[in-house]
Image: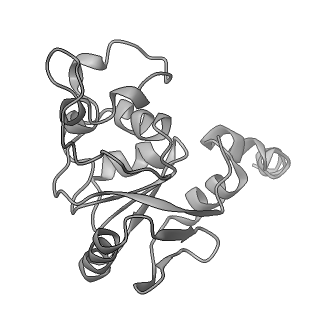
């Protein structure tokens, strides 16, 4: 797992509501359990024609950054961890939306992708600012649990404390448990 404390980057704006896991990573690409190579399949049907040639005028063209700003209800649909794998493998370390599907949120947190849930008003302001200045930097600070951008302001986002600690230390769930093995063994010896 990668450590995440602060992510400061240009953002990739995809202001579409209800982006489901099949749009994130089409089901036909789910034939492997290895996490590598999914980034190039991220939003594949938006980016490529049926014959594999790039689509002209794709919403992602000309954008880069390690923060994805999406519309409301990101990651809905079927429960596939491959969606989080694709987002991570494509270089994104945070996704900002006003709502996340619970299963996507859990999969993202388990794969070093920070789901940053903000209010609809903040998302609308951020979206408008990014449309006006596509190269504007966005800052996601896991330590203070805030997301900010110049001219937009900042907003606090929720995250479960234990998952926050895991991301900040680069721990998987198992690493988290093993980091406190002395306390676990002490407890077990007394019970």
x and y percent of residue 133 in the render? 37, 71
Q: Position of residue 32 (x, y in %)?
A: 40, 13
User: Could you tell whether 58 is left or right of 152 in the image?
Assistant: left
Q: Nearer the viewer, residue 6 or 115?
A: 6
- Residue 52, position as x, y percentages in the image: 23, 18
- Which of the 4 image quarters holds residue 128? bottom left
Q: Residue at x 66, y 38 (%)?
A: 174
Asked if residue 97 lies left or right of residue 110, the reply is: left
Give the quarter of the figure containing the N terminus: top right
Q: 16 above or below 78?
A: below
Q: Position of residue 105 (x, y in %)?
A: 38, 51
Query: Which residue is found at the position 64% from the left and 56% from the top?
Result: 4
Q: Residue at x 49, y 34 (%)?
A: 89
Q: How is the image coloured?
A: one colour
Q: Is residue 96 left or right of residue 139?
A: left
Q: Is residue 148 above or below residue 23?
A: below
């Amino acid at each position: 797992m990668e450590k995440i404390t602060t992510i400061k980057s240009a953002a990739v704006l995809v202001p579409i509501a209800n982006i489901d896991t099949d749009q994130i990573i089409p089901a036909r690409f789910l034939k492997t359990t290895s996490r590598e190579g999914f980034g190039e399949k991220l939003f594949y049907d938006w980016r490529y024609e049926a014959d594999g040639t790039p689509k002209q005028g794709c919403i992602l063209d000309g954008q880069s950054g390690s923060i994805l700003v999406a519309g409301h209800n990101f990651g809905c649909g079927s429960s596939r961890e491959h969606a989080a794998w694709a987002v991570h493998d494509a270089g994104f370390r945070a996704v900002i939306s006003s709502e996340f599907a619970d299963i996507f949120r859990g999969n993202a947190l388990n794969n070093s992708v920070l789901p940053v849930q903000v209010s609809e008003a903040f998302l609308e302001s951020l979206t408008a600012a990014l449309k006006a200045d596509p190269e504007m930097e966005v800052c996601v600070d896991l330590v203070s649990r805030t997301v900010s951008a110049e001219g937009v302001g900042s907003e606090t986002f929720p995250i479960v404390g234990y998952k926050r600690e895991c991301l900040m230390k680069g721990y998987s769930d198992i690493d988290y448990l093993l980091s406190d093995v002395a306390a676990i063994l002490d407890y077990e010896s007394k019970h």
